[in-house]
Image: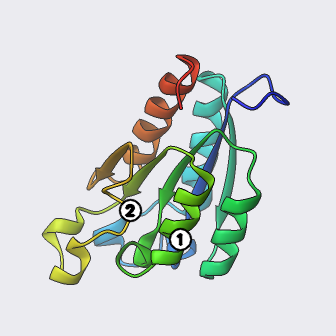
Amino acid sequence: MSASQSTPKVLLINGPNLNLLGTREPGVYGSKTLAQIVAELEQKAAELSVQLAHIQSNAEHVLIDAIHQTDADFVIINPAAFTHTSVALRDALLGVALPFIEVHLSNVHAREPFRHHSYFSDKAVGVILGLGPKGYALALEAAAERLHQGGK
C-alpha cells in the first residue's frame, strides 16, 4: 500500500468496446451496462474498505498512460480485444510491477480460436472468465483480501 494513502486502491481497467455493454451482443456479454457494473463495484469496494478508480478506453495509449500514472496498489483489467494483441499493455503492467487480475465477461475458450490466447494470463495473479459481471466482483474481493493481508 502506498505510504500516501490509508486505504488500499484498486484500478479497474476496461478495454475497447466495453463502453457498449448492455447493447453489444447481449447474448455474449449480458444486458448490464458498464456504468451499472462500475456502480455495483464501487458499492462493493466501500464494503471491502478499498478505493476503486475506473478507466475505460478504446485507445491503447490511454490505458497505458493510466497504468503508468496510477497510484493504485492493484489492478483489475478486462483488456477486451487487447487481450489477444497488446504486448504494449502487458509491458505497461509489468513495468509498474503491480499485481493484477485478468477478467473476461465471456468464456473466451468457448469462442473463436483467436480469442484463446492472452498476452496477460501468464503474468496475472488470477484469471476469471465466463462469469459475466460477477467476475469483476470476485476479482475485487480477491484483490481486497490480498491487499488487507499486506500483500501485493
Judge whether 57 appears above or below 131 on screen: below
Where is residue 22 shown, x and y percent of the image? 48, 68
Quarter occupied by residue 125: top left
Q: Residue at x 66, y 79 (%)?
A: 61
The local secondary structure at tag 2 comes to loop
Q: Is residue 59 left or right of residue 31?
A: right
Give the mark nearest the N terminus, 1 or 2. Answer: 1
The N terminus sits in image quarter: top right
The local secondary structure at tag 1 comes to helix
Residue type, mark 1 in image: Leu
Residue for badge 1: 89
Q: Residues within 10 Å of mark 2 (few under 14, many from 20)?
A: many
Residue for badge 2: 120
Residue type, mark 2 in image: Phe
Q: Is residue 11 left or right of residue 30?
A: right
The one nearer the camera, 100 or 79, is 100
Between the C-alphas of marks 1 and 2, the distance is: 9 Å
Where is residue 120 shown, x and y percent of the image? 38, 62
Where is residue 15 shown, x and y percent of the image? 53, 71
Where is residue 137 shown, x and y percent of the image? 46, 39
Asked whether the viewer can see residue 15, the reply is no
- Residues at circles 1 and 2 in contact by the CB criterion of under 8 Å: yes
